[in-house]
Image (cartoon, rainbow, N blue to C red):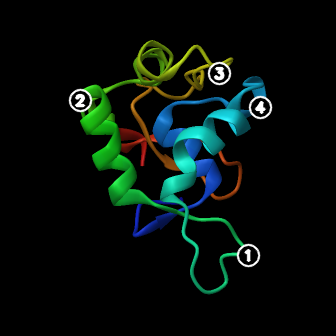
């Protein structure tokens, strides 16, 4: 399981935002326009992209007035479209084995989204 730390990778970044990267043609456009400012640019950053988690979460709360953790994937994507632009992005679907789409973790083996109650 990938979990939060100082830095997060792209699969976890997308999961925290509730975005299905494979089904979203504007993922890279959205990432470049809004998430570039959270990217880590220090040592070894050219080998492996990482984003700062805490400033990302603070930014989200300042833009939406809500914590990411309380919103499900559909609500997260709806907020992005409502407040930041109508990007062609789709929310992550609820995996069959899960009950909630408040995704907060990422499976290391499959990159599948996991909710804290499923860990």
The span from disc 4 to disc 3 (Cα, nearest Å) is: 9 Å
**N-terminal label among 2 and 1:** 1
**N-terminal label among 1 and 3:** 1
The span from disc 2 to disc 3 (Cα, nearest Å) is: 20 Å
The span from disc 4 to disc 2 (Cα, nearest Å) is: 26 Å
Task: Tell me if residue 59 comes above or below residue 74 in the rendering.
Answer: below
- Residue sticking out furthest to the left: 65
Which mark identifies residue 77? none
- Residue located beneath label 4 in the image: 22
Name the mark nearer the viewer: 4 or 3. Answer: 3
Tag 2 near tag 3, CB within 8 Å: no
Tag 2 near tag 1, CB within 8 Å: no
- Residue located beneath label 2 in the image: 66
- Residue at 57% x, 21% y: name it: 91
Q: Is residue 108 left or right of residue 38?
A: right
- Residue at 53% x, 18% y: name it: 85
Viewer-proximal residue, 5 or 47? 47
Tag 4 near tag 2, CB within 8 Å: no
Name the mark nearer the viewer: 4 or 2. Answer: 2
The location of residue 44, given as percent across then percent down, is 67, 84
Residue 69 showing in the rendered view: no
Q: Secondary structure at mark 1?
A: loop
**N-terminal label among 4 and 2:** 4
Task: Tell me if residue 80 comes above or below residue 17 in the rendering.
Answer: above
- Residue located beneath label 3 in the image: 89
């Amino acid at each position: 399981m990938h979990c939060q730390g100082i830095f997060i990778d792209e699969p976890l970044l997308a999961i925290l935002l509730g975005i299905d990267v494979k089904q979203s043609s504007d993922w890279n456009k959205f990432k470049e326009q809004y998430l570039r400012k959270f990217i880590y640019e220090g040592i070894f950053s050219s080998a492996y992209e990482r984003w700062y988690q805490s400033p990302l979460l603070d930014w989200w709360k300042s833009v939406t007035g809500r914590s990411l953790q309380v919103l499900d994937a559909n609500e997260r994507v709806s907020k992005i479209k409502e407040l930041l632009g109508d990007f062609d992005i789709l929310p992550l679907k609820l995996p069959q084995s899960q009950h909630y789409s408040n995704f907060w973790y990422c499976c290391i083996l499959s990159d599948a989204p996991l909710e804290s109650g499923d860990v």
